[in-house]
Amino acid sequence: MKKKMYLSLMSVMALGLIGCGAKEASVDTESVEVAEEETVQMNGLLDPDTAYVFGTATLSYAEFYSGDVSSVDSYDAVASATTGKSEIFPNMVTDFVDETTNADGYHITGVKNVNVAVPADQVDAYKAINDSFVEADVEPEQYKVVTVEDGKAKYSETNFAVADTVTDADAQLLTGTVWGDYEIDILETSTSYIKNTREDGDFKIDGNIQGIILETESGLKVGMEYLQSVWVQPYEISFNVASDNTHNQRMTFDNLDELSKLEKETVTKVTFINQNDAYVYELDGVYVKPVYKDAKATAVVDEKAETITLSDVPADLENPTVTATYVVGEGREAIRTEVCSAAVADSVQMDSAALKEAKAAGEGSYTIVISSDNYANIAVVTE
C-alpha cells in the first residue's frame, strides 16, 4: 500500500524551492506517477493525506455506475430466458451455475475486475462487506474510491483514464430492432478502436468492456448493461424504453426507468469503459425518436399479385415508408431478402425479382415495418 502523490503538487514544490534561491530542486520520481502520453488522467478523487490500498472487486451495476450516471435507483438485474452466453463477457457477473440449476435462465448482476481504491485503515472492513476484493501491486490510472460508512460500502464516481476522445465518428439510429426498441451504431471514420466484426483483431474496445454510458444534450447520463445493451461487438448499443419485450424475448430489460428517459433526447456523447481506460465519442447528436404508442397497422400480402395492402397506418407520420423483408430461418443464420421499399400507400408493389429470389430460399415469413421522420419504426402485423 502507498500514499497517492500528485505530479502537480511535486512540481509546485520544486518551483518553490527554485524561487527561494535553491540551486537545485529534486523530485522523488519514485513517488510520482506520470500517465502515459496518450492518456488523460483526471486526479482529485484521492485525499493526498490518506494512504490507499488498490485492488479489484466485483460490483453491482448500481455500485459500478455510482457517481457516473444520473441515477442508479432502478438497477436490479438483467434476466436471461436462456442458458446461453453466460460466459461471453470476461467481466460479466451472473448467478449461472449450470444448465440444470438455471434451466429457466440466469441473472446478470454486475461487473467484475473493477479497479477500486480503499483507505488503508478501512481495508478489513471493506473485505467483510465485499469478499471479492483482491489487493493489487500496481496502482491503476482508472478506479473508483470506496469508503465504508455505517457498515456499508460507498463508491465514488470513476476516475476515468481517457485514452482518446473521438470527434469524427458517425452514429446511426435504428428502431424496432430484434435487440430492442432502439439501437445506436457507432461508425468510426478515422479510428478503429471498437470491435465491429465477429473476427478477432487488435481492438481497444471489445468483449472485455465493462460498461457504456450514453450522455444527452440535456445532461442525462444512462449506464448500459450486458446483453441488453452491451454486446461483444460494442459498436452496437441497444435499449428498450418500455416493458414490452417483443423485440428481444431472450432478455427481461432492467433499468427501464432511466432507459425510458432517453426517448426524445439527443445523444451527444458515448463513453466506453474498460478496466483500465475509457474511450469517449463526441457525436453531432442522435435524436431518439419516440415510440408510437398503441399503433395497430396491419398488412395483407398477396404473393400472386405481388402486392401489400396496408390498413390502420397512423395519419400523423411524417414521410412514412414501408419496408417488407422475407425471412427464411431464425437468428444469425436466417436468410433475409428485402422485397419491398416504398412510400406508404393503401397498396404497394413488391419487387418481382426480389420476391422470386426470396421464395427460392425456402418457406419463410414477412417482416414489415413503417419508418417515418417523427416516430420510431412501427412493426406491422401481417394478416
Image: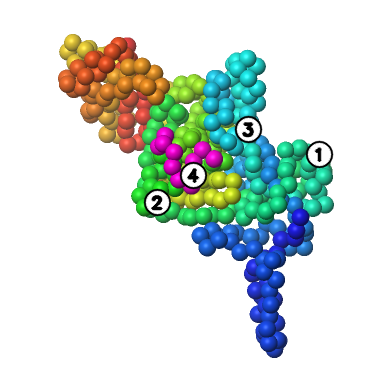
Q: Name the colour scheme.
A: rainbow
The residue singled out by tag 2 in the image is: 191
The residue singled out by tag 4 in the image is: 205
Compute the Cα span from label 3 to label 2. 30 Å
Quarter of the image for the C terminus: give it. Answer: top left
Q: Secondary structure at mark 2?
A: loop
| Residue 128's disc number | 1
Asked if disc 3 and disc 2 are in contact, CB closer than 8 Å, the reply is no
Location of residue 92 in the rendering, given as x and y in whole percent from the top left corner: 59, 34
Compute the Cα span from label 4 to label 2. 12 Å
Q: Examine the structure image and report whether residue 202 is included in the region drawn in magenta.
A: yes
The type of residue carrying mark 2 is: Thr
Nearer the N terminus, badge 2 or badge 1? 1
**Magenta extent:** 197-208
Location of residue 205 in the rendering, given as x and y in whole percent from the top left corner: 49, 44
Q: Residue at image x 64%, y 44%?
A: 114
The type of residue carrying mark 1 is: Ala
Q: Residue at image x 28%, y 13%?
A: 362
Q: Looking at this view, is 30 or 5 the one in front?
A: 30
| Image-quadrant location for residue 4 | bottom right
| Residue 293's disc number | none
Nearer the N terminus, badge 4 or badge 2? 2
| Image-quadrant location for residue 376 | top left
Looking at the image, the residue that sits furthest to the bottom is: 21
Q: Examine the structure image and report whether residue 83 is included in the region drawn in magenta.
A: no
Location of residue 190 in the rendering, given as x and y in whole percent from the top left corner: 36, 52
Residue 62 in the figure: left or right of residue 221 = right
The residue singled out by tag 3 in the image is: 93
Residue 120 in the figure: left or right of residue 271 = right
Task: Using the image, determine if residue 312 lies above or below residue 156.
Answer: above
Q: Residue at image x 56%, y 45%?
A: 274
Task: Using the image, determine if residue 162 lies above or below residue 64.
Answer: below
